[in-house]
Image (cartoon, rainbow, N blue to C red):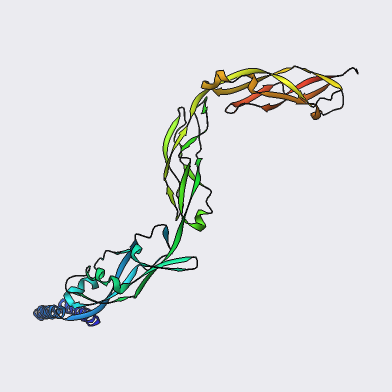
Amino acid sequence: MQQLKNNIKNWIETVKKAVRSIKQNRDLLAFVLFLVLSIGLWFLNALRKEYTTTISYPVKYENFPKDYILLGEPQDKIDLKIKSLGYSILPYYWGKILNPEQLNVSSFRRIKQGNKYGAFVLTRDISKDFSSKLSNGIELLEIFPDTLFVSLEKKERKRVAVKFEADLFFEQQYYQSGNVSLKPDSVEISGPASLVDSVTFVSAKFELEEALRDSLVRNVSIKGIDKLEITPSRVVVDIPVEPFTQKNLRIPVDHLNIPDSLSLKSFPGVINITFTVAASRYSRINAQDFSAIIDYNQRDTKGLPDRLKVRLLQRPSGIKNVTYSPLFVDCLFEKKAKK
């Protein structure tokens, strides 16, 4: 094959020289035409000879054994030593596009060393697959390397929670009225054990393009993780949204940690609390859902009477913009009469 390459190179150089000569001396035109014809005939004759050469052939791996994944990058090309007439080999020399040969890894022989797995095939056992892909009249003499090997890793599986991520914003007086629900709320991940063990959750994330004023249900893709399979790859996100309205309540103030020897009167004995709540829950929120207290142990001075700060110990979930007044109440302590 090297001889053919050299002949082609020499022919091209000869033509170039002839063209330069024509530009300088038109009397040479007849000679050049004769020369080109002679070289063309010689080239056609050369293509009828038999040559031996080596070409590179791409390969691709598929159908991996169940519960195993590819580890690393296996060899993606092999060398084929072929023999044929020049006109059959010439397309490969000029860069003929070759479709990768699909190699069925499930049919490879398996090996195991400790915790490492692998599979291999002797190229002579698959030589017929390559011979059938070559042009008619080309004889496959040898394949390099003599063995193809792939490293495998056992696939691990586990279920992890789906975490919803989004920056939510709402139109005025509209808010999220409940927890975001995900269906399903967990997915299966599979892949290399080292990666699977390190993952505790996956993310379902999207970006809003406008403020919300109605509940939103959307099919959302789960953010992929390199080298891991996620099943299913999408979840349905349900974000409940409602208009919120303001509500006012009067809440009694309870007393904590009052010594047995004292009685306490607070002024006032109730506070006014204001909050916004989803319209559908407006009638269900009442004073019993709140707990307001003053704590004797939180006194700032030893003098009597005293002022104590009101604290909210309990309030229902889902309400917003909670305010109350007064923040402090006046307290009158009286000693109890001894019995």
Query: In the image, is 318 to the left or to the right of 96?
Result: right
Residue 269 visible (yes or no): yes
Q: Which of 187 and 313 is in front in this view?
A: 187
Q: Is residue 52 above or below residue 260?
A: below
For this orientation, the residue located farthest to the right is 338
**Position of the N terminus by quadrant:** bottom left
x, y percent for residue 57: 29, 69
Answer left or right for 270 relative to 189.
Answer: right
Can see residue 94? no
Left or right: 260, with 66 as reference point: right
Identify the residue at horizontal 50%, vertical 40% (top origin).
164
- Give the quadrant of the C terminus: top right
Q: Where is residue 263 in the image (x, y as percent from the top left)?
A: 83, 19
Left or right placement of residue 164 versus residue 150 in this view: right
Q: Where is residue 201 in the image (x, y as percent from the top left)?
A: 52, 46
Is residue 83 placed above or below 77 in the rendered structure? below
Q: Quadrant of residue 60?
A: bottom left
Q: In this view, does 182 lie above or below 33?
A: above
Q: Is residue 117 above or below residue 206?
A: below
User: Total label count?
Assistant: 0
Outermost residue on the bottom side: it is 3
Which residue shows up at 52% across the image and 33% down it?
179
Residue 145 image position (x, y, % from top left) = 34, 75
Nearest to the observer: residue 318 or residue 68: 68
